[in-house]
Image (tube, helix red, strand yellow):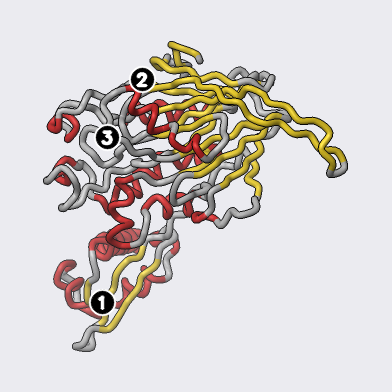
Amino acid sequence: MERENRKEDGKILKKILEFLKEYGHTVWELSQKLSINEDSVNFYLNKLTNSKKYLAGGFINSWRTHGGSFVYVYVSPTKKRDPLPEKAFISLPTAGNEGEKGLYQRVIILDDVLGPNNEPAKCIEITPFYDIHIGHRKCDMDLFRADVEQVRKRPNRFAIFGGDSIEIALGDSAGGAAWAGQSIPPDEQRIVFENEIRDISGKTLVMIPGNHEHRTTKKTLMCPLREVAKSLEIPYFAGPVILDITWRGFRWTFHISHGRSGSNTPGGKLNAVGKPRNYVVADFFIMGHVHDKKSHRVSRLVPRREFREGKLVSFSIMPKVERKIICPSYLMYEGTYAQQAGYTPGSRESILIQLNADGSSTVATGSRTLEGDVTGINI
């Protein structure tokens, strides 16, 4: 008889818990649902409140209504997020770097980084993620996730995010009812993006916003990508940034911007990405925005000075090879504002930057393989 009573008590406790998980209930409401008197409800509530077995880490909370009755509700345990991945690089403080308002980011990648087959890496690979447009119904999430996975599983592959990572189409955004093309509301796009890249946060060298994120900034003075970067501990800059990467005694300098251009010609787009060459000396000039894929080598003569104990001991003029890179988009073409406006379809291929152990560098442009390599032209 006692065992039967315990079984019946267990059933009632489970029912009360189910009700309290839905929303708050008063003692009277519970008595009506369970067809028992209010004294019995109070007995079971007291039993449930002290039961670790049924609460499973949560607890019963209560508050008094204006009429004096108590409302009871079950509060689920707070889920602890997994710790962030360990950083695969060292970020150094630099003179003039004021966080998001700075212009310069310097990172050191450890010399002993491994390659995809767990052998000493022959190169460092960098995937530039531009114009993902998470939240747009035509965002190619499968392609984006495949590239993220390659960064995650290849020890020597790193990432940069160059803006328009999320769609953020508002009612007055360019394109009229562009907001209607979203599959995810703007307030959820940041959360989705953060969850998608969490596993590669320790290999993301830098993050900047694009014109789509600026839609929010113009109205609220808050950038959603800044919140993502803060949560994932990713270096964030509010605009173009100069990035220095040091590995095995060599240094490569990048000028990274989201970019802007209204040109439909290859030359016009390459001229746009090369504009900072007027005031910045770098090995790579990278932008996106135009949803195209371009890579071009250019040369310039630069002075080289060597000093010893503060005195100039040699001076020479040397040729320097620079690369202008335009990164493709993860946004498909048909049914988007680009098709409606008559823009040229964007590229669906890839860009992969390789920094070699001998100090040289190459840029692979072409199609992705299942192994994560990029086949095509190397310049």
Quadrant in the picture for the N terminus: bottom left
Kindly report which numbered mark, 3 or 1, lies closer to the viewer in this rendering: 3
Foreground residue, 8 or 175? 175
Task: Kindly identify the amino acid type of the residue bearing the numbered disc 3.
Answer: Gly
Foreground residue, 50 or 230? 230
Foreground residue, 213 or 203? 213
SS at mark 2 in the image: loop
Tell me what residue is drawn at x 16 percent, y 67 percent.
33
Task: Kindly identify the amino acid type of the residue bearing the numbered disc 2.
Answer: Glu
Q: Is residue 31 above or below residue 201?
A: below
Q: Would residue 216 appear left or right of 237 to someone viewing this image?
A: left
Q: In x, y percent, where is residue 301?
A: 61, 26
For marks 3 and 2 on the same chain, the one whose residue lies earlier in the sequence: 3
Marks 3 and 1 in Cβ contact (< 8 Å): no
Tell me what residue is drawn at x 32 percent, y 43 percent.
166
Tell me what residue is drawn at x 50 percent, y 56 percent.
101
Task: Kindly identify the amino acid type of the residue bearing the numbered disc 1.
Answer: Val
Q: Is residue 114 above or below residue 162?
A: above
For marks 1 and 2 on the same chain, the one whose residue lies earlier in the sequence: 1
Kindly report which numbered mark, 1 or 2, lies closer to the viewer in this rendering: 2
For marks 3 and 1 on the same chain, the one whose residue lies earlier in the sequence: 1
Q: How many angstroms separate mark 3 from mark 2 (CA)?
A: 21 Å
Marks 3 and 2 in Cβ contact (< 8 Å): no
The residue to which callout 1 is attached is 71
SS at mark 3 in the image: loop
Q: Is residue 47 above or below residue 138?
A: below
Tell me what residue is drawn at x 29 percent, y 77 percent.
42
Q: In x, y percent, where is residue 218?
A: 30, 58
Q: Would residue 330 appear left or right of 51 to someone viewing this image?
A: left
User: What is the crowding at mark 3: few (fewer than 14 residues within 10 Å), some, or many (at least 20)?
Assistant: few
